[in-house]
Image: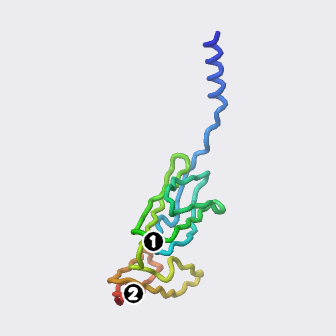
C-alpha cells in the first residue's frame, strides 16, 4: 500500500511540472568591449525571445537588466590588465560578451561608438597610443580616411 501511494505521488508530481520556455534565438551586441583603465558603463543589446541570465562572477563588473537588455558597469582598474568572458544564457542557448580592460592608457579612443543619420556623416576619431596602429572595417558602407598611423611618444 505504501509503495502504491509513493508511486501515485511521484506520478502526480511529474504531471504537475511545467516546462521552462525554450529560446529559439539569443544574440549579444556588441560581443566585446575594450574598456579604458577608468572603467565605465555600456549598454548591451540582448536579442532573445525568452528570459536570460548571466554567469558573471567578476567583482569588477556589474550587469543590470535594462528594458530587456543589459547595462554593464566596469570599475576603474588600478591593477594589472584584466579580461572576462561573460556567458548570457537562455534555455539551452548561450552567447558571450568579452570584456577587456587595460591598466594603462597605452591605447585609447575618443569615442567607442558613433550614431549616424540615414544621410551619413563624417566622424573624427582621436587615437592615443605609444606605438603604431592599424584600423579596418569590413562593412562596405563605411570608409576610413586613414587605416594606419603612428602615435607620438
Question: Which is more toward the observer, 80 or 124?
Answer: 80
Q: Position of residue 86 (x, y in %)?
A: 48, 58
**Residue at left offset 51%, top offset 56%:** 56
The count of marks equals 2
Answer with the quarter of the image where residue 108 lies.
bottom left
Percent x, y for residue 127? 43, 84
Which type of secondary structure does the marked residue at label 1 adopt? loop
Name the residue: 56% across, 65% down. 72
What coloring was used for the rendering? rainbow
Q: Is 8 positioned to the left or the right of 146 in the image?
A: right
The quadrant in which the N terminus is found is top right
Report crowding for label 1: few under 14, some 14 to 19, many 20 or more residues within 10 A (C-alpha): few
Q: Is residue 73 above or below residue 88?
A: below
Q: For the residue carrying disc 2, how many other residues have a C-alpha within 10 Å: few (<14), some (14-19), or many (20+)?
A: few
Residue bearing mark 2: 146
User: Relative to 35, is 72 on the left or the right?
Assistant: right
Q: Which mark is residue 51?
A: none
Number of the label disc, if any, that sits on residue 78: 1
Q: Is residue 90 above or below residue 103?
A: above
Given the current orientation, which residue lies at the most extreme front position?
78
Q: Earlier in the sequence, mark 1 or mark 2?
A: 1
**Residue 10, x across and y down, in percent:** 62, 23
Front of the two marks 1 and 2: 1
Image point (57%, 49%), residue name? 23
Furthest residue to the top? 1
Coordinates of residue 20 in the picture (x, y in percent): 61, 42
* Depth order, front residue of 77/119: 77
Identify the secondary structure beneath mark 2.
loop
Q: Quadrant of residue 102?
A: bottom left
Which quarter of the rendered picture does the C terminus lie within? bottom left
Residue 100, quarter of the rendered image: bottom left
Amino acid at each position: 500500500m505504501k509503495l502504491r501511494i509513493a508511486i501515485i505521488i511521484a506520478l502526480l508530481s511529474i504531471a504537475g511540472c511545467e516546462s521552462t520556455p525554450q529560446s529559439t534565438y539569443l544574440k549579444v551586441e556588441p560581443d566585446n568591449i575594450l574598456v579604458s583603465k577608468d572603467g565605465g558603463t555600456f549598454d548591451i543589446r540582448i536579442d532573445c525571445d525568452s528570459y536570460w541570465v548571466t554567469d558573471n562572477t567578476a567583482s569588477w563588473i556589474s550587469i543590470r537588466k535594462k528594458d530587456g537588455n543589459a547595462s554593464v558597469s566596469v570599475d576603474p582598474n588600478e591593477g594589472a590588465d584584466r579580461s572576462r568572458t561573460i556567458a548570457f544564457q537562455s534555455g539551452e542557448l548561450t552567447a558571450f560578451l568579452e570584456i577587456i580592460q587595460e591598466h594603462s592608457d597605452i591605447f585609447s579612443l575618443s569615442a567607442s561608438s558613433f550614431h549616424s543619420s540615414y544621410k551619413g556623416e563624417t566622424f573624427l576619431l582621436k587615437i592615443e597610443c605609444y606605438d603604431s596602429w592599424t584600423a579596418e572595417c569590413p562593412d562596405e558602407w563605411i570608409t576610413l580616411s586613414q587605416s594606419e598611423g603612428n602615435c607620438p611618444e
